[in-house]
Image (tube, rainbow, N blue to C red):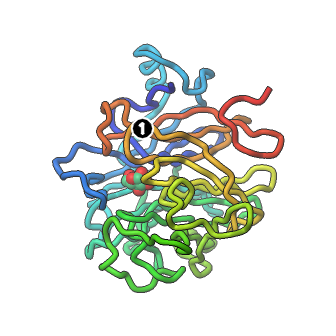
Amino acid sequence: MPSPLITHIYTADPSAHSFNDRLYIYPSHDRETSIKFNDRGDQYDMVDYHVFSMDDIPSEGGSQVGVDGVEKRSQEVVDHGIALKVEDVSWVSKQLWAPDCARGKDGRWYLYFPARDKEGIFRIGVAVSSKPEGPFTPDPLPIPGSFSIDPASFVDTDGKSYLYFGGIWGGQLQCYSTPEGGIFDSTKDGPYEPSGPGVTALLPRVAQLSTDMHTFETPVRDIQIVDDDGKLLAADDHDRRFFEAAWMHKRNDIYYFSYSTGDTHLLVYATGNSPFGPFTFKGKILDPVLGWTTHHSIVQHRGKWYLFYHDCELSNGVDHLRSVKVREIWYDDKGDIVSQKPE
Ligand code: FUB
């Protein structure tokens, strides 16, 4: 089993990117709290972000075991310190959750982050830096029209940029009834999601980003995830329906949309021909790990593909004290993601 990449603090929700031939990780920074565990996720009470970087993954590909391996690995990962904190962002009340970062056409780096506003509603903010490791300067208000959690940025090969987002239960996606969000329905805030025969699952969202990376260029759209017959996944299909942790990557002109199934604790993916979808469900990327949440990113670096994810091994299973790990992944000749190197 891979060892934690970072051992001096707890880290989760790793969004990894290869910038200037160096790997950068943008994770959540978990911390101890006395807040009681609940299905709104109040115990995930994070107040800042650290950015990490490394030249490359050690050749063991994340499969080092034992104390020596952990120490060696940790020495190779640079912690660039606090890149952004709650007090820096005027609209935020609490809970800096899973962030991501993209490079803009202006050569600067844009950190996208979800947090509760002063009314307790999750919005998505953006902060900018001249360096990939920050520190980042936030815009004074959240991105207009943004809602829910887990922003994941994607810069396509044609230069257009997109923001994927959404998460149900604590992430509040179930509180919105239109693709664009609209009015927040507080009666659905909590561990609620639709259910029943013929009811389709809640859908993640995407919008194209403006050229300056600060706003949405297009209206927010639903992302359709369908089965092999082209039917939307059912709300009760908890092994396949979207819960949170959207991620987009592209390989050989195929768009891979991956996500967490939440209460069934799987990382899964679906593929399509457009960054807007629809995406056809393909299968599992990762079995449940120790801990409730599972959240990942997929990145190519120096010719290899890596799955970054987290588990709670370092904290002996405390759900809100997680640690980032990495393992190599491969593709078969059909383009399906496989966890063993094909023969
Ligand atoms: O880290 C807080 C939340 O836990 C994230 O936003 C979710 O994806 C889950 O990992």
Q: Amino acid at mark 1?
A: Asp
Residue 208 on image: x %, y %: 63, 72
Return the residue nearer the eye: 178 or 214: 178
Number of other residues with Cα within 10 Å of mark 1, as a class: few under 14, some 14 to 19, many 20 or more: many
Residue 63 on image: x %, y %: 55, 23
Task: Describe residue 131's horizontal placement relative to residue 249 as left or right.
Answer: left
Do we see residue 133 in this rendering? no
Return the residue nearer the eye: 211 or 184: 184
| Residue under the point 56% across and 77% down | 220
Q: Is mark 1 within 8 Å of ligand 1?
A: no
**Which residue, as the protein is rendered here, is positioned at the far left?**
34
- Which image quadrant: the C terminus? top right
Secondary structure at badge 1 equals strand
Please, is residue 51 above or below residue 5 in the view?
Answer: below
Task: Describe residue 82's horizontal placement relative to residue 299 as left or right.
Answer: left
Quadrant for residue 114, please give it: bottom left
**Which residue, as the protein is rendered here, is positioned at the far bottom?**
183
Return the residue nearer the eye: 126 or 14: 14
| Residue under the point 61% across and 70% down | 223
Residue 148 on image: x %, y %: 42, 69
Quadrant for residue 302, please give it: top right
Do we see residue 143 in this rendering? yes
Name the residue beneath numbered marker 1. 311
Please, is residue 341 above or below residue 293 in the view?
Answer: above
Residue 245 on image: x %, y %: 50, 55
Please, is residue 324 above or below residue 274 in the view?
Answer: above
Task: Describe residue 73's horizontal placement relative to residue 231 as left or right.
Answer: left
Please, is residue 12 above or below residue 280 in the view?
Answer: above
**Which residue, as the protein is rendered here, is positioned at the far right?**
333
| Residue under the point 35% across and 81% down | 185
